[in-house]
Image: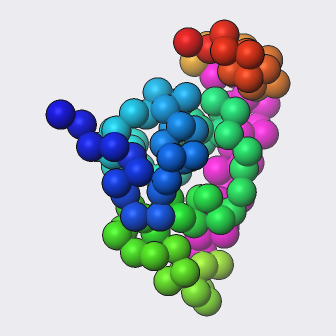
Amino acid sequence: MSTPIRSIRNLGSAMETAFGRAGITSAEALREAGADAAYLAALRAGMTAHFAAYLSLVMGLQGRPWQDARGAEKDALRARYEAVRARLEDPAEGEGAQGLPLGLRRFMSEIGLDR
């Protein structure tokens, strides 16, 4: 039996849906993938990038409230977030496993053709 993603601190049904679109359907799978890879997969599946969501994910996987990140730790997480976003926008990484451009993959996700 798998544990729902929303059981992870800071993550709710919207994040569960976003990760589900990326094929990450359990808390166990999310933990195995790790924050950066899972967040990138969700972005590639059409989730809108937002630092607060990334922060909630990273801190939640540590069992901490998202508000705990401060100072140097928060700055380091911002740098990681920007690095993940850069990978999304990198043309070399823009062609995902489906071999389609990111914009087309997002459109297909929006109209339900990604399943």
Q: Position of residue 4 (x, y in %)?
A: 34, 43
Q: Residue at horizontal 52%, vertical 74%?
A: 66
Up/down of 79 relative to 44, above or below: below
Residue at 39 percent of width and 46 percent of height: 5
Lateral position of residue 83 relative to residue 68, left or right = right
Which segment did they paint magenta? Answer: 76-96
Magenta stretch contains residue 77: yes
The quadrant of the rendering that contains the N terminus is: top left
Residue 73 seen in render = no
Farthest residue to the left: give it: 1
56 is higher (above) or lower (below) than 47: below
Name the residue nearer the viewer: 78 or 23.
23
Marks counted in the figure total: 0
- Residue 40: % across, % down: 60, 42
- Is residue 82 one of those drawn in magenta? yes
Foreground residue among 3 and 58:
3
Above or below residue 105? Residue 72 is: below
* Magenta span main SS: helix
Residue located 74% across and 16% down the image: 111
In the rendered image, the residue lying farthest to the bottom is 71
